[in-house]
Image (spheres, rainbow, N blue to C red):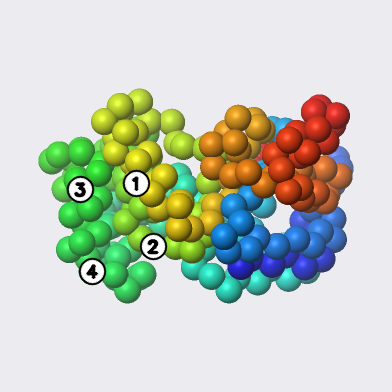
Amino acid sequence: MIVFENVSKSFWTGKQRKVILERASFRVELGHSLGILAPNGTGKTTIINMMAGLEKPDEGDIRRSSRVSFPLGFMGGVVSKHSARENARFIARLYGLDPDYVEAFSRWLTGIAEYFDQPVGTYSSGMRARFTFSLLLALEFDIYLIDEGMPSTTDVEFNRKAGSILRDRLRDSTVVVVSHQPATIEKFCNRAAVLRDGQLYQFDTLEEAKRLYDYQS
Ligand SMILES: Nc1ncnc2c1ncn2[C@@H]1O[C@H](COP(=O)(O)OP(=O)(O)OP(=O)(O)O)[C@@H](O)[C@H]1O
């Protein structure tokens, strides 16, 4: 479970305060995947980063009592001067997993051949996206955090393999997806929330959430 209690978060733009959350309280419960709808630039990534523990609230508490993933596509834990092999093995150890397994899984899924042994800094953005996605799928989490759906990779074979593993994984786990498009949320969850005026309004159905979201738009 992830619990937000009286959480406030804002940024100072130099001219005004950009409010993301204003004493907001909500929770993500295991078994109840949640889609958060919000227009671009209103705080989706900030909320996902706070759920992952990458960003701190200004005030309030965020408590995590489950294994929460890093956001899909997050590159912060990957060191560019090391190869995918070295990164995969290091991250496996951090999570207490078998480095041989994580390396083999990631090597197979990314399909980047000899580049797997080259520094990550030499990869194209698509190769990097495939590598971090493979790490997310190699590790096991209770709650997966996804910012705007699948990462944009044009590799058809990778999308097919990764998409099918992700769908299997999500059957037994919980996902939080943030997007500005109801269609993206629809792929992953049937419950949705709308971020508005610093509050997160949760609904039992995506239809209800869409009504508020469309009204707001
Ligand atoms: N470190 C920061 N300092 C100042 N402003 C920030 C900072 N991080 C984010 N912001 C601002 O906060 C707002 C929300 O940013 P965020 O990236 O969370 O939005 P988003 O909904 O994910 O946007 P997009 O859909 O465009 O990716 C934006 O106006 C952004 O410019």
Residue 87 placement (x, y as % from top left): 28, 57
Which comes sooner in the sequence, label 2 or label 4?
Answer: 4
Residue, far left: 114
Distance from the alpha carbon under mark 1 to that under mark 3: 15 Å
The one nearer the camera, 23 or 163, is 163
Judging by the rendered image, the residue that carries numbered circle 3 is 107
Residue type at the position of mark 3: Arg
Distance from the alpha carbon under mark 4 to that under mark 3: 14 Å
Judging by the rendered image, the residue that carries numbered circle 4 is 98
**In the displayed structure, does residue 104 sit left or right of residue 195?**
left
Q: Tell me which residue sits at (30%, 28%) in the image.
A: 155
Judging by the rendered image, the residue that carries numbered circle 2 is 140
**In the displayed structure, does residue 185 sit left or right of residue 74?**
right
Q: Tell me which residue sits at (46%, 51%) in the image.
A: 170
Which comes sooner in the sequence, label 1 or label 2?
Answer: 2
- Per the image, label 1 sits on a secondary structure element best described as helix
Which comes sooner in the sequence, label 4 or label 3?
Answer: 4
Which comes sooner in the sequence, label 3 or label 2?
Answer: 3
Q: Tell me which residue sits at (70%, 62%) in the image.
A: 27
Ligand 1: image quarter: top right
Contact, CB < 8 Å: mark 1 with mark 2?
Answer: no
Contact, CB < 8 Å: mark 1 with mark 4?
Answer: no
The mark found on residue 165 in the picture is 1
Looking at the rendered image, the disc whose residue lies closer to the viewer, 1 or 4, is: 1
Label 1 CB less than 8 angstroms from ligand 1: no
- Label 4 crowding class (10 Å Cα cut-off): few <14, some 14-19, many 20+? few
